[in-house]
Structures are given as C-alpha cells and as structure tokens.
Amino acid sequence: MFKDLNPILHSQLRLAVVSILISVKEADFTYLREKTDATAGNLSVQINKLKEVGYIDVSKSFKDNYPQTICKITPEGVKAFEEYVRDLQSYLNIKK
C-alpha cells in the first residue's frame, strides 16, 4: 500500500541539498552550508553520497586563490526528487 521512500533522499540534509539545487540549478558549497545550517564536514559527506548515486554533479576549481566547489542537480536527481515527492504525497492522500 505504501511505497518505500528513497533512502538517499529521506535524509534531512540530503533532501535539503537536493531541494535547494532543484530551485537554483547550481550552488557553491558555502551557499549550501549557509542555507542548510550544516557543518562543513557533514555537508561534505552528504554531498559525496548524492554524487555517488548520480543525483548531483560536483566540480571543484579555484576562485581568487580559494577552492570553490559547485554542485549541480542532474536529470537523474530531478527525477529522483519528483518521485520522492510523489511517493510522500501518497502517504498524505490515504482515504479513510
């Protein structure tokens, strides 16, 4: 009756990162850290998990001699997010 929710997106921080990237298409690490109020270490781990499953692309470069990490949502990430939202809505639409 209930669909299993995607365990990757069911994590609060990973869901927050994907939700932000859905709306802005790309964001740097500092922006994501500020918006999620996460520690740098925890955010880094969660970004790597999202990258490993192909939900985001991560590019690293330098800007004014400082490292810069840019995250972008992938088409697979958009699809996974949309499915997650649909599955979650099914929990809310149960008729009594």
Image: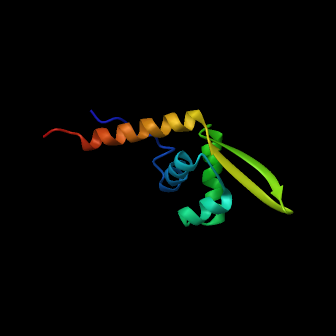
Q: From the viewer's perspective, tell me whether residue 6 is left or right of residue 56.
A: left
Say which of 28 and 93 sits in front. 28
Q: How many numbered circles does the render carry?
A: 0
The residue located at (61%, 37%) in the rendering is 74
* Picture quadrant where residue 45 is located: bottom right
Q: Residue furthest left?
A: 96
Vertical arrangement, residue 70 with respect to residue 77, above or below: below
Residue 16 on image: x %, y %: 50, 54
Q: From the viewer's perspective, tell me whether residue 85 is left or right of residue 31.
A: left
Q: Quadrant of the N terminus?
A: top left
- How is the protein colored in the picture? rainbow
Q: Quadrant of the C terminus?
A: top left
Say which of 79 and 22 sits in front. 22
Q: Residue furthest right?
A: 65
The residue located at (66%, 56%) in the rendering is 44
Q: From the viewer's perspective, tell me whether residue 62 is left or right of residue 33.
A: right
The residue located at (55%, 67%) in the rendering is 37
Residue 63 on image: x %, y %: 82, 59
Q: From the viewer's perspective, tell me whether residue 89 is left or right of residue 8.
A: left
